[in-house]
Image: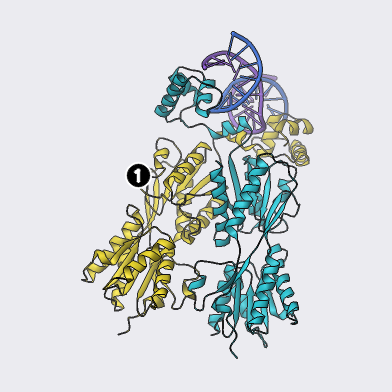
Chain colours: A yellow, B cyan, C purple, D blue
DNA sequence: CTGAAAGCGCTAACAT
DNA sequence: ATGTTAGCGCTTTCAG
């Protein structure tokens, strides 16, 4: 790989001039610029990133650490992040923590070590990598879930009222024993959705019962188990509010196994919309979260911080909204 | 952020010793190691990546550049890559080229500039960033689609015979006018699936006709259009082979619009399995590709190259297999 | 076993 | 407007 001094030699100038010419800094005679550019092109010169980063003490890359690449909710976020980062001249690297605190910590570590300009993090839970962020000057914004240490901005969704509304919707449709499958305890979104579900029950003057609630990780296989357990009870629920896409799939599988029909035998509302949700029969009612927007505002916030705006830590809360489809049609009597 | 010399001062040793102690290189008195480790911990020292990379002339991160983060096929690949990379002590950063050659080139550029140890690339098409890879010593492996320049290894899927088999399957199920929606021309997987489809028609002694073929990008909206156009013809197809997941969704939407039932009015087989495919009514028949495995073998190949194994460029072809479900059930007569 | 010192490739003062 | 030079923070010969 050609170095800057080779380019300088070939163009018959100093390395400083090459640097200036290639970076558009300072003022360089246009004829020299042309020579430098030509020399660089001929040699296939590409500046050495680490050297530049070391010297400049900054990079132009953002790290986005999410807990599950296979979850459309997070990939939608990443699209949002990328669109604004890209427009501002930043690259974004996506790291998949796989909901594993160790991996998350590891990725936060490499991000910091490599001196990324900022990090966007959807924390896996209680013991996330945020400790590393402490003290370090690197700007962070939390996505979807707040950062325990309260360092940096956060972009959240008002998931609790949305869960309440969805629960109420099921009740209005005639379902009387609404159950809930949510995520692991300690994860804020899982807790918020459960709390909202209870809010809804309360508002409907329905008793909530532990036998109607199950937890699982946000994965399909655990969800299928949880749904089976819920449905296999003596007095099973006649409707379900479930906390994400993957859980919805598990629940639908369990319903199918039992020969139960969504939107008739069992009302169903899931968090997170998906392209296939309306293809199901009946189509799946969902609480749609503004994932893409979370990405864009998160990235804007982060870029603002990087730009040096010394504002207080902010929390932006976006709204989710209920999309009523067939899986929550009125309960036949 | 604490520097190595601060750690050295605090531990009362030289920076060289700190470096050796922290990296487990050379032999350092165990008591000194303890002092260094303690000092580092107290200061919250984390080595500066760019400085280290500059000095070492190598990094321990892999770049994985895929064309669509929202496509489960590619996220499954990324899981495979990550699992093996992680086990070998490498981090992987995911870059989303969005099937845009410019973005792809840009990402290849940053990857090379930042001196990643290697890159895994699913090239967007003809004019991909592979030109940059030329000459540069950085190892590359192509995933899913071959690299035009034939630099480096490739991990592909025998998608053509699979398409042939799927087409034949539809014919055997009694469908007589099998159509095909594939990806943009010039993209090898799109071409291979189309070729396989034609192979299948030929093997079944059926005439292939341009009026039964449509192309669109690998996105849902274009696919919906394409399917409408196919279905709206005077003599429409009675079955469809479609080239990926997103296209399948578009096709299913178009079928629903026209009141056509998959697996009865119109047989349907799609490339790529998905968690929701079996939840549809009828469940979706698919050609399942070994995406996760592509990731693992790709990463292994890459690590091998990085390790300096100076082998010839290899091409590994994995097998896809047909999963027959309800959307290709025998055509009622 | 440990320290001194050179230098990775680049950019930014500073000098001309 | 261009060149000279001093590092950025680290690792690694090379001495001791």
The image quarter containing residue B11 is: top left
Q: Counting other residues with Cα less than 10 Å from the Cα at mark 1, is it few (<14), some (14-19), or many (20 or more)?
A: some
The residue at 67%/71% (across/down) is: B163
Of residues B263 and B104, the one nearer the viewer is: B263
Residue under the point 23% across and 66% down: A209
Give x and y (percent) for residue B4. Answer: 50, 25
Is residue B190 among the parts visible in the rendering? Answer: no
The percent coordinates of residue B206 (x first, y second) are 74, 82
Query: Quick check: A111 left or right of A251?
Result: right
**What residue is shown at x 52% (from left), y 45% (from top)?**
A62
Which residue corresponds to the image point at 22% horizontal and 71% vertical from the top-left? A206
Left or right: residue B107 versus residue B211 is left
Which one is nearer the viewer's eye here, A281 or B164? Answer: B164
Q: Pointer 1: what residue?
A: A150
Q: How many marks?
A: 1
Specify whether residue B9 is in view.
yes
Residue B182 point in image, percent of width and height: 66, 70
Between residues A234 and B72, which one lies in front from this camera angle? A234
From this view, report whether residue A95 is shown above or below residue A193.
above
| Circle 1 chain | A
């Amino acid at each position: 790989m050609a170095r800057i001094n080779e380019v300088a030699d070939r163009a018959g100038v100093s390395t400083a001039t090459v640097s200036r010419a290639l970076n558009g800094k300072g003022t360089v005679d246009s004829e020299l610029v042309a020579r430098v550019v030509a020399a660089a092109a001929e040699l296939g010169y590409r500046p050495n990133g680490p050297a530049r980063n070391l010297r400049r003490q900054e990079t132009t890359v953002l790290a986005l650490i999410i807990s599950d690449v296979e979850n459309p909710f997070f990939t939608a976020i990443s699209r949002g992040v990328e669109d604004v980062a890209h427009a501002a001249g930043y690259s974004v690297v996506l790291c998949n923590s796989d909901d594993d605190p160790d991996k998350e910590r590891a990725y936060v570590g490499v991000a910091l070590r490599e001196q990324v300009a900022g990090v966007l993090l959807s924390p896996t839970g209680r013991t996330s990598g945020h400790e590393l962020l402490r003290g370090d000057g690197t700007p962070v914004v939390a996505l979807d879930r707040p950062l325990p240490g309260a360092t940096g901005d956060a972009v959240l969704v008002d998931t609790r009222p949305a869960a309440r509304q969805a629960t109420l919707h099921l009740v209005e449709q005639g379902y009387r024993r609404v159950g809930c499958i949510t995520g692991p305890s300690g994860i804020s979104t899982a807790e918020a959705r459960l709390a909202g579900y209870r809010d809804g029950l309360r508002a409907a003057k329905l008793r909530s019962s532990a036998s109607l609630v199950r937890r699982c990780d946000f994965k399909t296989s655990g969800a299928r188990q949880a749904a089976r357990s819920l449905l296999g009870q003596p007095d099973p629920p006649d409707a379900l509010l479930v906390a994400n896409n993957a859980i919805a799939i598990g629940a639908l599988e369990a319903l199918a196994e039992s020969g139960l029909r969504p939107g008739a035998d069992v009302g169903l509302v899931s968090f997170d919309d998906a392209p296939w949700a309306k293809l199901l029969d009946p189509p799946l009612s969902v609480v749609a979260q503004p994932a893409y927007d979370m990405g864009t505002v998160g990235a804007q916030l982060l870029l603002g911080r990087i730009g040096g705006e010394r504002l207080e830590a902010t929390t932006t809360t976006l709204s989710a909204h209920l999309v009523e489809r067939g899986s929550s049609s009125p309960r036949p009597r």
